Amino acid sequence: MFCKAGKSGGFAACSGILLSMFGALVPLNVSAQQSTGVPNPHADVLSIGGSVTEIVVALGEQHRLKARDTTSSYPPEITALPDVGYIRALSPEGVLSVGPSLILSEEGAGPVEALDVIRAADVDFVEVPNALDAEGILRKIDVIGAALDVPDKASDLKDEVGQALAAAIGDADRPEAEKKRVLFVLSTEGGKINASGTGTEADAIIRMAGGVNAVTEYDGYKQITDEAVGLAAPDVILMMKRGGNHGADDDTLFEMPAIRLTPAAQTRSVVRMDALLLLGFGPRTAEAVRDLNAALYGEGA
């Protein structure tokens, strides 16, 4: 599996791979009608994408939410809302069946044909750009705040999130010589390592948390050879919490030929974090930075 983050559309494609990984955490193809949740009768917004939904809630506009997509799993009470399906496998019928007057969608939703039909319907559709840094997260808040017509709330949330991010990133910083080399493993399917290069959410959060991405030879996510893993010489393996081939247990992971001789295997250093918290780049990213920094260097580092 390979994803290159180019200047025109490449980042959305890269995000699509991650979104497919998020989808592995929850059942796919769940129709809105299958939900037992009963939305507010005055709700009018369909939120597509975990970070978008988190921002809507953080703005104090949760009462506006009429439905969500499968990747929108935080805060937990959101899961009571009707689910229109997985962000990369939407159907026009499922999306429009909930009757939203406004759709807020993360960049990278699809398929394209479904979005064309949805955009042609009599529904306002706002695409929220992806983010790889603090500035991008604040831009998300701006876009969503404007779409919901709550600019003052958005301004307050931006101040809060911006300050939290600046503090977390500042506290995580350390001299280059002390930074640990971190290999983000997207999956171990078929005994092969699919790892993050540069230009990804994983690369960004590693750097924000005071680490060094162990792989910088390519953009996006790519299945790499055992030799490449050895040359990367990671001190720590970073993964998302999950089951199946995407989340090999520690014993299996450290016995893989690609991993076995790395510094990380010698110390059995692996960090597993919630996917949406780690890679969502929403209002909780400062928490993710602090949690990852503490996992890499110890509490109070």
Image (spheres, rainbow, N blue to C red):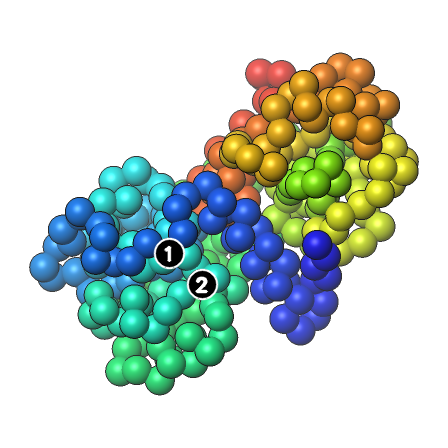
The residue under the point 46% across, 78% down is 113
Which residue is label 1 attached to? 29
- Callout 1 environment at 10 Å: few (<14), some (14 to 19), or many (20+)? some
The residue under the point 73% across, 36% down is 191
Percent from the top left, x then y, of residue 80? 22, 45
Residue 255, compared with residue 33, is above or below; it is: above
For this rendering, which residue is in front, 253 or 229? 253
What kind of residue is marked 1? Asn
Q: Is residue 171 visible?
A: no
SS category of the residue bearing label 1: loop
Percent from the top left, x then y, of residue 120? 35, 84
What kind of residue is marked 2? Ala
Which residue is label 2 attached to? 89
Percent from the top left, x then y, of residue 121? 30, 82
For this rendering, which residue is in front, 144 or 245? 245
The residue under the point 61% across, 24% down is 249
Residue 76 shown left or right of residue 204 in the figure: left
**Residue ranking furthest to the front:** 190
Residue 224 shown left or right of residue 153 in the figure: right
The residue under the point 32% across, 54% down is 30
Q: Is residue 267 visible?
A: yes
Position of the N terminus, as image quadrant, is: bottom right
SS category of the residue bearing label 2: loop
Position of the C terminus, as image quadrant, is: top right
Q: Are marks 2 and 1 in contact (CB under 8 Å)?
A: yes
Circle nearer the N terminus (2, 1): 1
Residue 18 shown left or right of residue 184 in the figure: left
Residue 114, compared with residue 253, is above or below; it is: below
The circle drawn on residue 90 is none
Residue 186, compared with residue 200, is above or below; it is: above
For this rendering, which residue is in front, 301 or 189? 189
